[in-house]
Amino acid sequence: MKEFSIIDHFFKQRSYQRKDVLIGIGDDCAVGKVAKGQNIAITTDTLVKGVHYPHDTSARAIAHKAVAVNLSDLAAMGAEPAWISLSLAMPESDPAWLEEFSLGLQEISEYYSIQLIGGDTVQGPLTVTITAQGFIPEGQALTRSDAKPGDALYVTGTIGDAGLGLDVVQNKLRIPVQFHETICDRLNYPTPRVLVGTMLRRVASACIDISDGLLADLQHILDASSCGALINIDKLPLSQAMLESVDAEASLNYGLTAGDDYELLFCVPEDKIANMERALLNANTAFTCIGQMTGQAGKLEMQFNKQPFVFSGKGFEHFSG
Ligand code: ADP
Ligand code: MG
């Protein structure tokens, strides 16, 4: 297949249509309309085979994950996702792969009502880059930098599951068969916390999505906000699958350092806690208070059942060492 028929068949015809897109795929640029009083949040993430997903990951999962990780960044800023573009490098044009990939893209686009508005298609090692735009009411962006000592520290969902899934698909670990699908889905089909992100506007003082591991991502909040934090390790939300698959030490290791969960980690001032909890309960989202922010800039302390807890591991980092 030629480049233009690939773009037309797999991407243009399958793109979800939004009213705020004036010009979509097919011209030199896309043109979109921004409602009055809204700001645009923009983010880009690239997935490289073997680095960001195992070699045998399905095309559908790659499409889902490439979009989901970008929507997770938008969620962490409190933005409502609107548009995405796709830069796709692939070694050859494989219609079966493109079919599965574009259906995966269509599926997640329809779920979140986002439109694929353009991109680029080139030959090269398989690399998928998505850029996403979302809207935030003026002045309401959630940043990493406004946490204050005394704010409570929360996390959505359960943590460490995607890291557990990675070890399972790479045959480094066997887990009970009844958890296999859920855990592998946590790795391949992450759920960006889009609704929660919008609910945290004007409520959370700082927010980040957990892509590199709880400790690594919390450190970004500490650095940006010039705060410290105290985490109660015994409060970490670990899934049933995690608790029944590995021992206590391994589960803490996954929970504190494994990446790819795309849960939100956020700080809430005391006078906003009741509102936040009510909103998240209404949204049917699990959330857990795991500690609080403290005054010593950059300092991270941990306790287990109120006793000091020492942990030596680290979250995932590219170019480390
Ligand atoms: P140009 O040469 O102007 O960069 P291209 O030939 O790369 O244009 O792309 C033609 C049109 O198809 C553009 O509107 C571009 O945004 C869109 N497009 C190209 N590749 C993709 C893709 N992978 N997904 C979505 N749209 C794409
Ligand atoms: Mg181009």
Image (cartoon, rainbow, N blue to C red):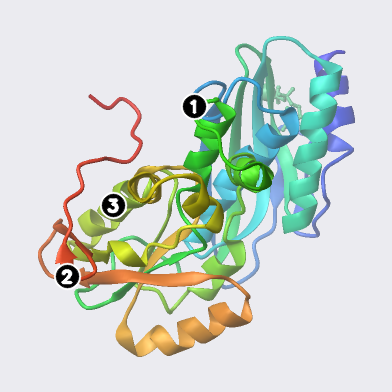
Residue of label 1: 172
Q: Quadrant of the C terminus?
A: top left
| Three-letter amino acid code at the position of disc 1 | Lys
Circle 3 Cα neighbour tier, 10 Å, few/some/many (<14 / 14–19 / ≥20): some
Element on which disc 3 rests = helix
Q: Nearer the viewer, mark 3 or mark 2?
A: 2
Return the residue nearer the eye: 198 or 180: 180
Q: Is residue 310 left or right of residue 65?
A: left
- Tell me which numbered mark, 1 or 2, is placed earlier along the sequence: 1
Mark positioned earlier in the residue sequence (3 or 1): 1
Residue 272 shows in this picture: yes
> Which image quadrant for residue 111?
bottom right
Q: Which residue is mark 3?
A: 220
Quadrant location of ligand 2?
Answer: top right
Rendering quarter of residue 192:
bottom right
Callout 2 amino acid: Thr
Q: For numbered disc 2, what is the local secondary structure?
A: strand
Give coordinates of residue 302: x percent, y percent. Answer: 20, 60
User: To which residue does mark 2 refer?
Assistant: 294
Q: Quick check: is the Cβ at mark 2 less than 8 Å away from ligand 1? A: no
Amino acid tagged 3: His
What secondary structure is found at the residue carrying circle 1? loop
Front residue (pair 245, 10): 245
Identify the disc placed on residue 229: none
Name the quarter where the N terminus is drawn: top right
Decide: few, some or many residues near mark 1? Use Cα within 10 Å; few <14, some 14-19, many ≥20: few
Place of residue 62 in the rendered image (x, y in percent of width and height, measured from the top left)? 66, 33
